[in-house]
Each structure stands twice: as structure tokens, then as C-alpha cells.
Amino acid sequence: MGTRPKNMSQLTWVYVSGAAFILFLVFSIILIAYAPRLLSFGITNTIFYILLIPAGLCSAAFLFGAMRSHAKYSGKISYGQLELSGPVVIFCLVILGGIFLAPPSSTFLLTVRVHKFGDKGDIIRDGKIILDLASQRIERVIGENGEVLFAGVPSEFLGKEINLIPNVPGFSAVNSETYKIPDEKVIFLELTQKKELTTVRGTVLDTDGNPIKNVTIDFESGSASTVSDINGNFNTTVAAGPGTIMLVTASLNGKIGYRDYVSIPQSGTLTIQYNNTK
């Protein structure tokens, strides 16, 4: 039979075990609050096992010191007989019970390799990738090697479809945002460069400042084309960002009256001075 401590009263043991329980409870609440972040680093299993230790200690302290109860276990092992008594039995029961009755789910490391369309060797190093796991959203920065590592992905997602959302300036996903996690746990994320579109408005005037209708305005030899209306106004969309230099040609009835390089304006309009004497 185990010996009970004589230098501490039952009430003292109640205080000690109660304080230990409160600390354990606070630690558990913190673990729950930061569970998504811990999951992303793949350390939930480690924290779970560490959490079992104070749980076992405060259980043993309360039962052995405050309740004045004791426990004993004996069993045979390969080299003889094992006999445990006192609070160590309670401690072992809590630890083993937590491991076998409520084991944390296993996880794996998901690698996402980001590259440009059509060439796996042309990697992308800037931006972020967002991973959606059911109701959980995880965001990671693309590394210098073009890889994004998502640690702590639950094993239940292996072979299942997930959402990968690229947040890369100037690029978008080639396919849909849904990908199936393969057995090798590596996904190649192919991105294509976005074509920036800008709306260009303007007016075609003759040398006297009068508007001219039916003038064809061409950007970059067919990249975009439009025709001026009765008031000489035109409106079109070009595949270029503001500030891009483009060749603009204006013609009427096959006769070119304007041909020059123009900077696409960020706001406002273009004024094309059509020279009908050319």
C-alpha cells in the first residue's frame, strides 16, 4: 500500500490540484484557440501528448493527496512481474487512456509547386497560395524554390479534392481552383500571365478641329479596332495596361490620316488629329 504524505493537509492538496487543473484548463483553451495555426505547422500531435502530462499529474495529485485514495497495478512482463502503486498508477492511466481512447488524427505534408504555364522549370517565386480545407483557410508565401509547404494536413484529405487559390500579382490559375491530392502529396500549380485590359475613349478631329465620323482606329495592327461615331467619338478595350506604348493608326475609306505611337492613358481620352491631306 502506498504511503501518503504527512506534511501536507488534504485542503492543501485540494489547492495544489485545483491550481494545476486551472493551469491545465487554460492551456487547453489556448490549444483550442490556436488549433488552426498549430495544424498548419504540423505540431498538434506533439502538443496533444504534452497536454496529457499535466492532466495525469493533477489527477494523481487530487486523488492521492486530496481524496486520500490509492491505486495498485500488477502484471507480468517479459522479465518478471511489474507492480505499481500510489499516484503513478493514476498518472499512467490518464496518459495511456488519452493515447488509446482519443488519439489525434494523423497528418501529412502537402507540397505545392508553382510554375508558369507549359514549363514546370519556369517557377514563380512571388505571391501567396491559399489552401481551403473544408471550413479552414490557410495562406502561405511562395518560397524561393517556387514551393509552398502546407504542414499538418489531415490524412482524411489524401486523395480528396481541395481548393488552391493563387494570390500572385499578374497571374491566374490555368485550370479550376479544385485539385485532387495525389498519393505522392505534391501538386503542380500552373499559372498563366493575366492580360491587363484598359478601356480607351477618344475623339477624332480634322485639322480644323471638327469631328470626323466613320474613321477606323486600329491599335497595334489589329489588337483592337473601333470606328468613330457621328460626333467623332470612339470607345474600345485594349489588352494593355495604362502607360503602355501602342501604335495607333486612323484611316478613312482606306486612306491613313494618322499613324503614331501613343501612351495608353490611365484616365481621360485620346485626341486623334486626322490629317485628310495626307
Image (cartoon, rainbow, N blue to C red):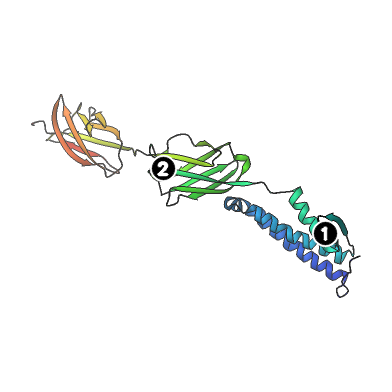
Res. 11 image quadrant: bottom right
**Mark 1 — residue?**
90
- Number of numbered discs visible in the structure rendering: 2
**Mark 2 — residue?**
115
Q: Residue at the spot x=46%, y=44% of the render?
A: 113
For the residues labelled 2 and 1, say whether their Cβ atoms are less than 8 Å apart.
Answer: no
Q: Is residue 31 left or right of residue 267?
A: right
Report how far apart the C-alphas of labels 2 and 1 lie in the structure: 55 Å
Residue 208: percent from the left, percent from the top? 12, 35
Q: Quadrant of the N terminus?
A: bottom right
Front residue of this view, candidates 48 and 266: 48
Front residue of this view, candidates 54 and 90: 90
Q: Of label 2 and label 1, which has the lower sequence position?
A: 1
Front residue of this view, candidates 246 and 161: 161
Residue at the farthest right position = 1
Q: Using the image, determine if residue 54 lies above or below residue 159.
A: below
Badge 2: few (under 14), some or many (20 or more) residues near its Cα, within 10 Å? many
| Kind of residue at disc 1 | Ile
| Kind of residue at disc 2 | His
Residue at the farthest top position = 253
Residue at the farthest front position = 79
Q: Is residue 201 left or right of residue 122?
A: left
